[in-house]
Image (tube, rainbow, N blue to C red):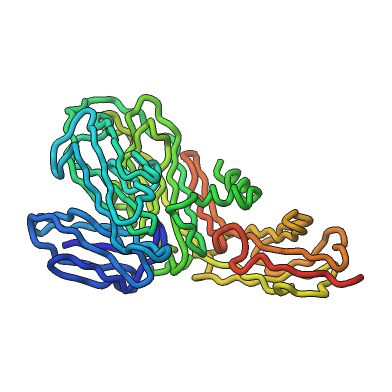
Amino acid sequence: MLKGIVVDSRGGSAVAGADVIAPFASAKTDAQGRFQLNFPDGNPYDIIIQKAGRAKTRVQGIKLKQNETLEREIPCRAQVDEGSNAPPQITVTGVTPGSTVSGMLDLNINVTGEEAINLVYIYFSGEQREPATGISMEMDDLPLTIDTIVYHDGPNYIKILAYDEKDNAALYYLPVIVQNGGDTGATVPPLTQLYLNSFSFGTSMNAYSLRPLEQLSKFQPKIAAKLQALQGGPTVEIQTAPTGGQIHIIISWEEVPGVDGYNVYRSFDGVNYQKIGSVLASQGEHYDDYSAQLAVGKKTYYKVAPYIDSQEGAALIREVTPLPTFNVYLQSPANNATGVSLNPTLSWQYQVSSPMPAGVEYSTTVAIYEEDIEVWSEKVEDDATQVTYSGSVLSSNTKYSWNVTTYTYTHSFDEEGFSKAFSFAGNGIGANNGPFFFTTGVE
């Protein structure tokens, strides 16, 4: 059986009512974007995900054994504009599904379609967004060499996700068996520090474009700087980010010298852990989890274990709970208001997907601009929804703009690291309906 969940982007909200079409059967996604199909044994099949107003996605080469259950998370983006709605096709040479691999694995990945190919992501042994094994932009042919020696022996896979210029997609998992005969008696140093940062956004940050912190650094450097400085309740029964929102968790750790890499595991009950990826030592010390299984109020546990050859060292475990998503809307002065006081009172309102847990702190900054130059800003405490301008008196008969940037956060620390959860109103760079413009009156 194939069980799937269709989302609008990695870490994004569910796509309900999408058609899932196989050569032998069809299904439709439910309100949580979920579906299931009973597959015939033995032969590989493609399925197509489609919905009006959205690009199509092809999931290639699904092959199941008798009584086997496979789970897949499948992106299905909004349609960009008019053009072909036919999803691309992935072809891999240099390895066949189910083959045993060792040493240096030389591949060639070719993606063809009716539209030009935009992006191709390649992952070996992982469901993360970053780090990737390979990324190709505006290329339909990608040679790639993978050093399998630094991965655990045993069943593994190559994951390829490709998009064309119209955001039609192809997703292909190619199973392999790694067999290098590594040293099972190696002494592996333990992991000493583990850090979790959970991010919730009221609107989708489009996980396939800029990363959230990169967007914040570009548009709101002060807020991004605060986030970077911070890095040194009620359960909501949902299975994806709230509609229009996005959730992701960044797992990071301190380097362990001399190891080949790190195995990352995830659990939602603190007992049963599933391996979700391997990060090579050469790739750094972080794993970006954009899984559709992450949800508001859903406690998530991570275990990270360093390894050498086929031997793991002592792991660390931490937990974090994503905060509710929320949005912020400007109210007064209204957009394009005239005759506004030279010392105006600015007000806004919040729209929260569910109550914030006890102990959550707010960080809200209100700013006024003249021709895109900030002339005043003030941080308000807690969940206040208005502030009176306290700077030098504004100029008469002058056009200004104003906006609000806000996020909530919780954190816990111990000698082995920390767990932090942030929730950014909207997309983290201002009010959902902002900025608003106003013109002052005459004194």
Q: In the figure, is residue 310 to the left or right of 135?
A: left
Give the vertical position of 212 relative to 178 (above or below): below
State the image coordinates of residue 236 (x, y, percent, origin top left).
42, 69
State the image coordinates of residue 108 (x, y, percent, origin top left).
25, 38
Q: In the figure, is residue 354 to the left or right of 10?
A: right
User: Which residue is rendered at x = 19% and y = 45% of the image?
Assistant: 175
Which quadrant of the view contains residue 387?
A: bottom right
Residue 262, visible in the rendered structure? yes
User: Which residue is rendered at x = 32% and y = 48% of the image?
Assistant: 127
Q: In the figure, is residue 427 to the left or right of 165?
A: right
User: Which residue is rendered at x = 19% and y = 59% of the image?
Assistant: 46
State the image coordinates of residue 77 (x, y, percent, origin top left).
38, 62
Q: In the figure, is residue 140 to the left or right of 98?
A: right
Which quadrant of the view contains residue 36?
A: bottom left
Quadrant in which the N terminus appears: bottom left
Residue closest to the far right = 443
Which quadrant of the view contains residue 21?
A: bottom left
User: Which residue is rendered at x = 82% and y = 61% of the image?
Assistant: 390
Quadrant in which the C terminus appears: bottom right
Residue 7, visible in the rendered structure? no
State the image coordinates of residue 123 (x, y, percent, origin top left).
31, 43
The mark tally for this picture is 0
Q: Nearer the viewer, residue 396 or 41?
A: 396
